[in-house]
Image: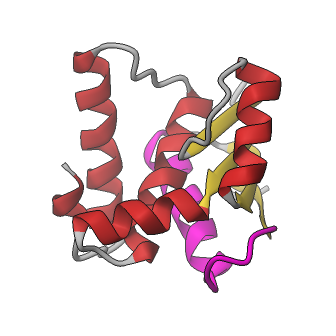
Amino acid sequence: MPANDYRIAVVDQQHVAAIDRRKLKQVVGAVLQSEGIKEAAIGVALLDDRRIRELNRQYLQHDRATDVLSFTYRRDDGLLEGDIAVSVETAAREAERRGIPLETELAFYVAHGVLHLIGYNDATPDERSRMWQRQVEILRDLRYEDADRLL
């Protein structure tokens, strides 16, 4: 059996921008590996604001679009299973506001979602700072040149 057994699927259900799904799979794998996860099944759905708003309303009772949602199904015995929903539309707006590539913003959101699946929280300022620092470290390791502009 290989050291890590990762099953990662990225489904593109939006029409905002062309996305390199392979790079997002690399982000998922890098987060899992850096956090010591040995086995995982992770799905990533790339959505528009309308669809992520529907999910946010259905599962969290928040009637608004958001950047990323995470759904953990199993986190035990070295196995992690979950899904992440990402709004490419929100990412595009935020990337433009920050003056960074959409690819970097999406990688940041995907890393954020995976960290939530693993158990990170961002409810307090300290938790948020720790989580965002971790996301940026991972993107730096993957050579996202604009990663430092995310803090």
Say left or right for 106 vs 141.
right
Residue 13 in the image: above or below residue 75: below
Q: Where, by quadrant of the figure, is residue 93 drawn?
A: bottom left
Q: Where, by quadrant of the figure, is residue 58 drawn?
A: top right
Residue 102 in the image: above or below residue 76: below
The x and y percentages for residue 79 are 74, 33
Residue 136 in the image: above or below residue 145: above
On whether residue 140 falls in the magenta region, the answer is no
Span of residues in magenta: 13-35
The x and y percentages for residue 140 are 26, 65
- The overriding secondary structure of the stretch rendered in magenta is helix
Q: Which is nearer the eye, 45 or 14? A: 14
Say left or right for 48 vs 148.
right
Q: Residue at x 61, y 56 (%)?
A: 87
On whether residue 15 falls in the magenta region, the answer is yes
Q: Residue at x 71, y 32 (%)?
A: 56
Q: Which is nearer the eye, 76 or 60? A: 60
Q: Residue at x 24, y 55 (%)?
A: 150
The x and y percentages for residue 48 are 69, 60
